[in-house]
Amino acid sequence: MELMVPLKSHSEIPLYEQIYEYIKEEIKSGNLKAMTRLPSTRVLAENLKVSRSTSQLAYEQLLSEGYIEAVPCKGYYVSKIEELVEVGKGQDEGFVPADESEETEYQVDFSPRGIDLDSFPFNTWRKITRNTLVDDNKAMFIAGDPQGELSLREAIREYLHTARGVNCTADQLVVGAGSEYLLMLLEQVLGPDRVIAMENPTYKQAYRVFNSLGYHVCPVEMDKYGMSLELLNESGAQLAYIMPSHQYPTGIVMPIKRRQELLLWAGQSGERFLIEDDYDSEFRYKGKPIPALQGMDTEGKVIYIGTFSKSIAPAIRVSYMVLPRPLLKEYKRKAGFYASTVSRIDQNILYQFIVGGYYERHLNRMRAIYKNKHDALMNALKCLEKDFTVKGEYAGLHVLLTSRKKIEEDVLVQKAGEVGVCVYGLSGYFIHPIHNNTKSTVVLGYANLTEEQICYGIRLLETAWLAE
């Protein structure tokens, strides 16, 4: 078939994004039916008089979001999503495995928890801090709004809407010192004795919080699209904790169809809610960031949680939660009296950092830095590609390596340690180790390493893992 995409050559919107938006809207409106074969990237590029890389980028974004599928040796086809109704229409912070706390000295530590603090804008942060305190502002030292300063919440709201597609008002936002605090606050709103489903493997710190609150946690296995809907239905859960934009630690990006299915599941009962953890959505190295699930929610079923720990620094300890309107009254009645756990001084500094344009510039800089590190890692891993598969690339700050020869995870970790390299077994991220069905996989984080350290570390792993 031939696609006539109306391109605006003088628009500020990149050509690949115009193509992506047009095809996405055609699919959503039903003009492009399921299993319709799309033109190849070469044919599309020739018809639209654009470069092949432009059409390829558009297709890659559509693939990532699940609007189209690539069938080997056949081409690109529209995904089966039209049969699903439009619903309602009419961290930091990875888990610390047990062995990570050992005080062993390593030459290279591929920790998935790190960030690049060498690039932190210390001078800017110092300047804003001085300006905040220069006039002996007494108001900064008295208790503020329990939900967080209105100015900061409005700045976060605007950022979430433009960058993540989140739809909310500042009144729906609650600012707190870390995601753990917000999850504990959420328990006050939702009530005790809940059954919550969690992706398995998952962010283990969230599991610990839910478990400590007395929630019955049901581990739900994932397929290639994310949390299994069939197993979710069997779990009897009223809540589901998910990371649709970049699942931790597998790196799975949940396609549009599965997102719709989960929204439909939540809409079947007034007691059901989805908790969306959007912990590192800022960092994506192909196409543009995947929109948040919350932006698709029209029935108030998604509780959205985000953090500045990955994008700025863990020590900032500022996270935020967007409550759907059906829960907002319950929050104010049951938990509105809790004082904010983030000082007004820190909130004001962060507010100035955002509205002054410093946050956007910092993000753009970090995206470039992390992409260079990502590319260095992927190039270095070519020496292992015959013996290992790589997953979770092109987004986030870590990748997964799985042995093609089924070498046990503990053997991989041990051999790496013998040459001075610390890697992390995937088994540490499963709620119960017995659920681990990928026993030959390790996690490699690269954010806090230099490009030279990354390349050196992979050379050492090649020596450790491929030596006869």
Image (cartoon, rainbow, N blue to C red):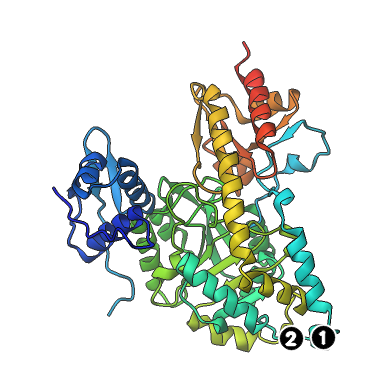
Q: How crowded is mark 2: few (under 14 residues within 10 Å), some or many (20 or more)?
A: some
Q: Is residue 429 above or below residue 191?
A: above
Numbered badge on residue 195: none
Helix, strand or loop status at disc 2: loop
Q: Which amino acid does label 2 sit on?
A: Gly
Q: In this view, does 415 lie above or below 223?
A: above
Image spot of residue 411 (x, y percent): 65, 25
Please state the horizontal and vertical placement of residue 424, each as a whole percent of the image.
66, 37
Viewer-nearest of labels 1 and 2? 1
Q: Which residue lies furthest to the left in this view?
A: 1
Q: Quadrant of the C terminus?
A: top right
Location of residue 416 with respect to 188 vertically, above or below: above
Determine the residue located farthest toward the top in the rendered image. Answer: 468
454 horizontally vs 194: left or right:
right
- Residue 432 appears anywhere in the view: yes
Q: State left or right for residue 204 relative to residue 90.
A: right
Closest to the observer, 405 or 298? 298
Estimate the spatial distance between the alpha carbons at disc 1 and disc 2, rounded to whole Å: 13 Å
Q: Earlier in the sequence, mark 1 or mark 2?
A: 1
Tell me which residue sits at (50%, 52%) in the image. Answer: 246
Task: Name the residue that disc number 1 marks.
Answer: 137
Residue 407 in which image quadrant: top right
Q: What element carries label 1?
A: loop
* Rendered image: mark on residue 144: 2
- Work out whether residue 192 can be spotted: no
Judged from this view, the residue extending furthest toward the right is 136
Q: Where is residue 156 in the image (x, y as percent from the top left)?
A: 58, 73
Q: How crowded is mark 1: few (under 14 residues within 10 Å), some or many (20 or more)?
A: few
Within the image, what quadrant is residue 232 found in?
A: bottom left
Q: Position of residue 438 (x, y in %)?
A: 53, 36
Q: Which amino acid does label 1 sit on?
A: Asn
